[in-house]
Every structure is written in structure tokens, then in C-alpha cells.
Image: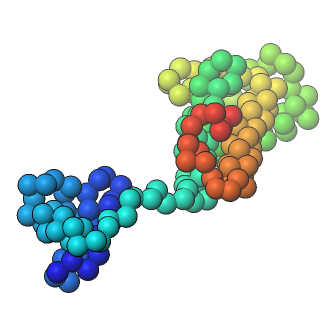
Amino acid sequence: MIAEAKYTEDGNILAVINGEAMFVPDDPTNSHRQMIAEWEAEGNTIPAYVTPPITSHEVDAERDRRIDAGFTFGGVLYQSRPEDRENIAGAATAALGAMVNGAQAGDLRWHGGNSDFVWIAADNSTHTMDAQTVFNFGQAAMQHKQMHIFAGRALKETSPIPADFSDDSHWP
């Protein structure tokens, strides 16, 4: 006895047969599929699979993935996971303080240490930065995040959210 049947995203059939829910392959040699075919011959139909609408949570997850994927500054890719953004913000704040206290462009020891200030890029290469560069680096990190937040917001304001919401064409 078949109570209901519907196609799933992968082309199988989710059916309730004798009170038990089961996934049945859409294969005419399968005995359960043969039972469903008889049920269909009696006038019943299996509704086509309908892709559920994209949710704002899916857009948020894509936005966060893209924010965390890194950003390019000065032609170099830098990491931008939450802990990286925290470190960049801290360094940019310290750089601003050094600039207020007179740090000059080209001074790579603006941070008060005995070695030049460097930042490690995503490929593990190091790049020297003066205070002005670090401040601009922090601004670039902020802009990277902000642009993705606004792109995600724009997607969530569309109705329905486009099925290709994760396509690069929707993101900065």
C-alpha cells in the first residue's frame, strides 16, 4: 500500500509504502519502483522535485565564506578569517597611533621594535609595511568585509533570492 510518493533532489523517490518511509531508486527493475508504477497506473502521480527557495541563511553562509577567503592588497593575497581581521584591526589601530605620534612614511620600525614591521601573506611570504601602509591595509580589510556584507544584503532583498546567488557575478 503506497500512501504517497515524491521525487527527491537526486532523482530517487521518497515513498511511504506499508506505513514505512523509504527511498526508492527510479529504476524499473526495483521491486518497490514496480509497486509505485502500479500505483501510478491507478491514476496517482509523483510530483516533480521542486527546489526549495534560497534562504537568507544560505546567503549569509556564502557571504561569510567569501569574507574569510582573503583579500588582495597591493597585489598580494592576505588571509581574512575572523582572527586575521582582528589582528589587522589591531595593527591598523597601532599604526594610526604611531602616525599621530609622528611616524613617517618609509619608517618600518614605527611599531617600536628592533626589526622592520612585516605582515605574512596567504602564501607565507612576508611584506614590510610602514605605519601608513598598515593603516591602509586595515582600511582595505574593512572595505573587503563591508562590500560583501552589502552584496549579501542586496541578494537577500531580492524576491526570490536568485538560485545562482553564489555565482561570482553577485559578489565583489
On the image, the x and y values in percent for residue 153 come to 72, 52
Q: Is residue 160 left or right of residue 39?
A: right
Residue at the (91%, 35%) spot, across then down: 100
Height in image: 11 above or below 126? below
Q: Is residue 146 left or right of residue 43?
A: right
In the displayed orientation, state which residue is furthest to the bottom: 19
On the image, the x and y values in percent for residue 64 come to 59, 48
On the image, which quarter does residue 127 sit in? top right
On the image, which quarter does residue 20 sit in? bottom left
Residue at the (12%, 63%) spot, across then down: 34
Residue at the (60%, 29%) spot, across then down: 78
Height in image: 27 above or below 138? below
On the image, the x and y values in percent for residue 32 come to 13, 66
The C terminus: image quadrant:
top right
Which colour style is shown? rainbow
On the image, the x and y values in percent for residue 140 come to 74, 33
Residue closer to the observer: 36 or 138: 36
Q: Is residue 57 left or right of residue 32?
A: right
Q: Is residue 172 visible?
A: yes
Q: Is residue 164 left or right of residue 4?
A: right
Height in image: 23 above or below 90? below
Residue at the (65%, 37%) spot, across then down: 171
Residue closer to the observer: 131 or 42: 42
Q: Is residue 116 visible?
A: no
